[in-house]
């Protein structure tokens, strides 16, 4: 999963152009920056050209310094979490891509009934960490790929409950580079949406509740079995390209209009689980985008529902 500093999370437009001259990063972080870094191997779909700039900060201060330097220089910033929700064009990403894979950006800590998680923490780790501590409120999100930051930005939802409902506090880098702390309600959470476009999520604090750890663990195990059965098990280059609309599922809409297994070039929808986009070794970003638009057009034409994409298009 990834997210970006932009205002339109569903746009298919190219990243805005930046000056041809190479950016000069501050001396304290310049050694972290790689140029023309290949992204494909870091993304679940296995597609993508090079990032103009790429960095893996090792701590919060480096992350903030990198982001602020790019923002002040007019260079777009993309945040790379697990890579599950990103489709990158082969032409490359004219931006600074910041990976949140370093341990200090993924830490989890519990204080009474509150979990504080770094934006780079895997959502699955946050779930299992709280369940083992006998804290409920995140267990229904088990099986959703990506990071805490990405889940919050897209207000991840399962079983009718979203992550925003338990988000108490956030520390973010705003689009202007300022670091601020905000209350959960200020994030303007709605169905699979938030008002956090244009921000980088440094960490989040969740207000949870005490529950029986054994009962929570059993529930989590059942969810894992059920959700594992709804995912292609023999495929690795996959992504979930659509947001479930309120009151329906993308899987059911696609299946009902006969688009399960539909293909464009090297990209297709799974025949058995059509809410998954699958790519083979020949797939291009253009194949994926054509397929996504074809499905959206047909769903809108036949059901009247404007199916939105959950992928970040870089």
Image (cartoon, helix red, strand yellow):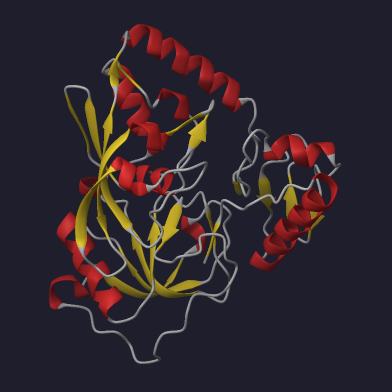
Residue 156, placed above or below residue 39: above
Picture quarter containing residue 235?
A: top right
Picture quarter containing residue 4?
A: bottom left
Q: Find residue 49 and report its horizontal and vertical position in percent.
A: 53, 71
In the picture provided, is 9 more to the left or to the right than 54? right
Q: How many marks?
A: 0
**Front position in the image: 265 or 180:** 180
Q: Residue at x 58, y 54 (%)?
A: 45
**Front position in the image: 264 or 119:** 119
Q: Looking at the image, which residue sits at the far bottom? A: 21
Q: Residue at x 28, y 72 (%)?
A: 33
Residue 144, placed above or below residue 54: above
Residue 46 visible here: yes
Q: Find residue 108 and report its horizontal and vertical position in percent.
A: 23, 35
Q: Find residue 242 and report its horizontal and vertical position in percent.
A: 63, 47
Residue 283 visible here: no
Picture quarter containing residue 233?
A: top right
């Amino acid at each position: 999963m990834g997210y970006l500093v932009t205002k339109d999370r569903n746009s298919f437009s190219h990243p805005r152009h930046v000056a041809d001259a190479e950016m000069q990063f501050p001396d304290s972080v310049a050694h972290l920056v790689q140029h023309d870094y290949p992204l494909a191997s870091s993304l679940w779909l296995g597609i993508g050209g090079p990032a103009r700039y790429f960095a893996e900060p090792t701590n919060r201060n480096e992350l903030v310094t990198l982001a602020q330097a790019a923002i002040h220089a007019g260079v777009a910033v993309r945040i790379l979490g697990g890579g599950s929700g990103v489709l990158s064009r082969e032409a490359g990403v004219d931006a600074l891509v910041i990976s949140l894979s370093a341990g200090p950006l993924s830490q989890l800590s519990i204080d009474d009934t509150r979990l504080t998680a770094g934006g780079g923490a895997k959502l699955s780790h946050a779930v299992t960490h709280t369940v083992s501590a006998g804290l409920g409120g995140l267990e229904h999100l088990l099986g959703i790929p990506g990071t805490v930051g990405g889940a919050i930005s897209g207000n991840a939802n399962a079983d009718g409950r979203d992550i925003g409902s338990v988000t108490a506090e956030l520390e973010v880098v705003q689009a202007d580079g300022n670091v601020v702390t905000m209350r959960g309600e200020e994030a303007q959470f709605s169905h699979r949406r938030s008002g956090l476009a244009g921000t980088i999520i440094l960490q989040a604090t969740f207000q949870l509740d005490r529950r029986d750890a054994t009962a929570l663990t059993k529930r989590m195990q059942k969810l894992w079995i059920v959700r594992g059965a709804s995912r292609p098990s023999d495929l690795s280059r996959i992504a979930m390209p659509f947001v479930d609309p309120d009151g329906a599922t993308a899987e059911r809409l696609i299946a009902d209009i006969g688009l399960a297994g539909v293909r464009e070039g090297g990209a297709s929808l799974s025949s058995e689980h059509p809410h998954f986009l699958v790519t083979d070794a020949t797939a291009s970003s253009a194949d994926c985008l054509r397929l996504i638009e074809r499905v959206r057009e047909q769903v809108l034409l036949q059901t009247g529902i404007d199916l939105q994409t959950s992928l970040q298009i870089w």
